[in-house]
Amino acid sequence: MSESNSAERSDGTDGQVSGATVVAQALKTQNVEYMFGIVGIPVTEIAVAAQQLGIRYVGMRNEQAVDICAEELGNNVRPAVTLLGDINAVTKQLLEQFDKTPWQYPLESKWWKTLREKMKSNEAASKELASQKSLPMNYYTVFYHVQEQLPKDCIVVSEGANTMDIGRTVLQNYLPRHRLDAGTFGTMGVGLGFAIAAALVAKDRNPGQRVICVEGDSAFGFSGMEVETICRYNLPIVLLVVNNNGIYQGFDTATWKDILKFGDATAVAPPMCLLPNSHYEQVITAFGGKGYFVQTPKELQESLRQSLADTTKPSLINIMIEPQAMRKAQDFHWLTRSNM
């Protein structure tokens, strides 16, 4: 190691320390409490050095990335105002300005009136769908029964296509900073990582608080092996996999078998299909957690009740729904409209 990379040892003697120790010391001086990483060179060395300094390390199985990119501003809809910068810094600046000059959008404005009418209409449509008694269940029926039992202080993590979009409208939050999801563009693979980070904070600061991670079956596939991470650290997470046998839509077992009669799956199976009735709950049981396979509202209610009551281990509820179930018709198509 060159002289420029050397540092003074913690015992006061002159000598060299590893680059991993320098990184760990830098993290410690910034009051970093947790470190997440994919085990491998050089992460392993940095993780060991961080733990020696009191930083808690969580080894993950799936790598994530974050970008701050000016080119993305206005990529979905054209904004009236754009803000470019670190979200913490920008939010702090906005709050400081609001403290100086308090402002609230007029409650009797046309915009508020239109919004209230739309909320009322959406609520009525969701209730109608949730009240359906047919089996397999639809998204709204599932979320209606989940919402009935959710603790008011729980943190909701949501990831998927229809699963996340519908969940946003039905699963309620009562406290700020208690919902995490894949964001505007629906980036997949972040759900379990979000849940792990939230659960670590909850475990340390609010013992007894639960994290409810709601995943579509396709979304779960992106980082499902993080279930091992959840079990390894025995985190207070209840995973709900809303399983429709596909990406957006799938097929039931009988239809899947009929499709395969026409040839090899690689030649005849629609690309959006996943294997019918996959038992994702067995993934968590393999690592010592508790798994449930449910097909009816009664089974869902009971399995969720047991999962919330059992604070000794994480659990996963694999919820089968109608493979062709969809969300209610949407009025806005800017997410799927080409910008070219």
Image: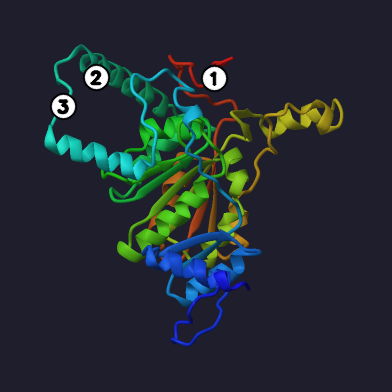
Please give the residue where the numbered disc 1 appears in the rendered image.
336
- Answer above or below: position of 167 versus 302: above
Q: Secondary structure at mark 2?
A: helix
Q: Position of residue 50 (x, y in %)?
A: 49, 71
Q: Residue at 19% of width from left, 40% of height from top? A: 96
Q: Residue at 55% of width from left, 69% of height from top? A: 4
208 horizontally vs 67: left or right: left
Please give the residue where the numbered disc 3 appears in the rendered image.
104
Q: Residue at 43% of width from left, 63% of height from top? A: 34
How many C-alpha atoms fall within 10 Å of the one at disc 3: few (<14), some, or many (≥20)? few
The type of residue carrying mark 2 is: Arg
Q: CA distance from mark 3 to mark 2?
A: 17 Å
The type of residue carrying mark 1 is: Thr
The type of residue carrying mark 3 is: Gln
Pointer 2 with pointer 1, Cβ within 8 A: no
Q: Position of residue 320 (x, y in %)?
A: 56, 39
- Answer above or below: position of 86 versus 101: below
Residue 195 visible in the displayed image? yes
Q: Secondary structure at mark 1?
A: loop
2 vs 1, front mark? 1
Residue 293 vs residue 120, the one in the foreground:
120
Give the mark nearer the N terminus: 3 vs 2. 3
> Furthest-front residue in view?
3
Q: CA distance from mark 2 to mark 1?
A: 26 Å
How many C-alpha atoms fall within 10 Å of the one at disc 1: few (<14), some, or many (≥20)? few
Quarter of the image where the N terminus is located: bottom right
Give the mark nearer the N terminus: 1 vs 3. 3
